[in-house]
Image: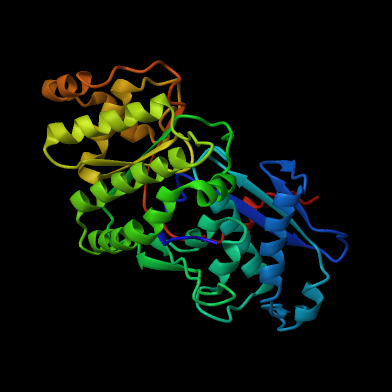
Amino acid sequence: MPINDSLLLMLDQADLQAVTTTLFCKLFTEDKLWLNGKEVDMNSSTLKRFRACVDGIRELASDKIDALTDEVIVSKSEWKTMPVHIASYNNFPTAAGLASSAAGYAALVSSLVALYDAKETYTGHFSAVARQGSGSACRSLYGGFVAWRAGGERDDWSDSIAEQVADHRHWDEIRAVILVISDKEKETSSTKGMENSVATSRLLEYRAKHVVPQRMNEIERSIHEKDFESFGKLTMMDSNQFHATCLDTYPPIFYMNDVSKSVVTMVHAYNDWAGEIRAAYTFDAGPNAVLYTLEKYQVELLALVLQYFPEVGEGFVNNAELRKEAMELVLETSLLEAVEKRCRVRDVGDVKMVYCTKGGTGPQTLSDDCSLFEFV
């Protein structure tokens, strides 16, 4: 269970997405899961999380009604004994600190809700089920800026749910530039890392009780007021403190690497040169950087990234039009001089790919031709 509230910005699914197809058939003999084309070995951890989501939504199932005939296709009672086959695919690295688990389990729960015609018994019930697959998945069921309220006042933790803070259209100028520094599975999973931190880090305990509550109030205010200066500073400070708790864990956890740290240095040099916060970094449980900025500075920030983190090859930036604009932009000499005093041009390959995106909606229902199952 969470020890404090947290917040995220749901990103545009046109750029990063997890696609999940859920299929039922009375001939199936057991539930099965495929991830990125490979059947998942149901080890104890995966099985427990998968089962929590499937069984949790099954309990909320309704009769499946044919839209044309109004006949019951599957009754509520039948769902409990009818296996499902589920396939999921991410178009971004899995288990590398880019919230692939959150996206995957949110897509899983959303597809199950649609399949079972599930009904919440209280507001946020679906998000309470999703967090049993991946904590962050609860926030991924909504669009825009979403908070995960820690809860804990109720014995069953039914108050540990997600809540939308603001729709993605509220602050449409927000942009994100994501640097994939590693596309490999991280050594310490988010869940295992947090378990160790809770058990050993006194700093984490202090942070949860005395720092996060005030910061949540401040960052939610900055979102409502569209105050990027405040939003950016709070985002960076909170990222820094999170990774400080990782170092305070015993044994210590090192999610960020030297390339990650060079991104931090570049961002601070850029902001110092500008005399304002134009970019804000945040790192989840991994080395990959998410840089928030405003639309008017996106091309400038991308140009700076490409200056200090050389392209690997074609398709290095997911948005070809933005890449073209960034490559054609001549950065001010004073900016380059300011950054060069504090960091160097990194080696080709230090950053594997760059995603340019913005805020987006919650889970969407796709057309049948997007199905991950082939029917013959």
Question: Is 142 positioned to the left or the right of 188 in the image?
Answer: left
Position of residue 7 measured from the top left corner of the image (x, y, whole percent): 39, 58
Q: Nearer the viewer, residue 183 or 67?
A: 183
Q: Nearer the viewer, residue 356 or 187?
A: 187
Taking the view exactly as shown, the residue that stands out farthest to the bottom is 70
Q: Is residue 325 visible?
A: no
Q: Is residue 224 above or below residue 305?
A: below
Which residue is pictured at 52% across the width and 40% down the height?
A: 250
User: In the rendered image, which quarter contains the N terminus?
Assistant: bottom right
Asked which quadrant contains residue 366, the reply is bottom right
Asked which quadrant contains residue 73, the reply is bottom right
Q: Is residue 314 visible?
A: yes
Position of residue 169 measured from the top left corner of the image (x, y, whole percent): 31, 61
Question: Is 301 positioned to the left or the right of 57 in the image?
Answer: left
Position of residue 122 measured from the top left corner of the image (x, y, whole percent): 54, 80
Q: Is residue 336 above or below residue 369?
A: above
Which residue is pictured at 33% across the width and 48% down the height?
A: 238
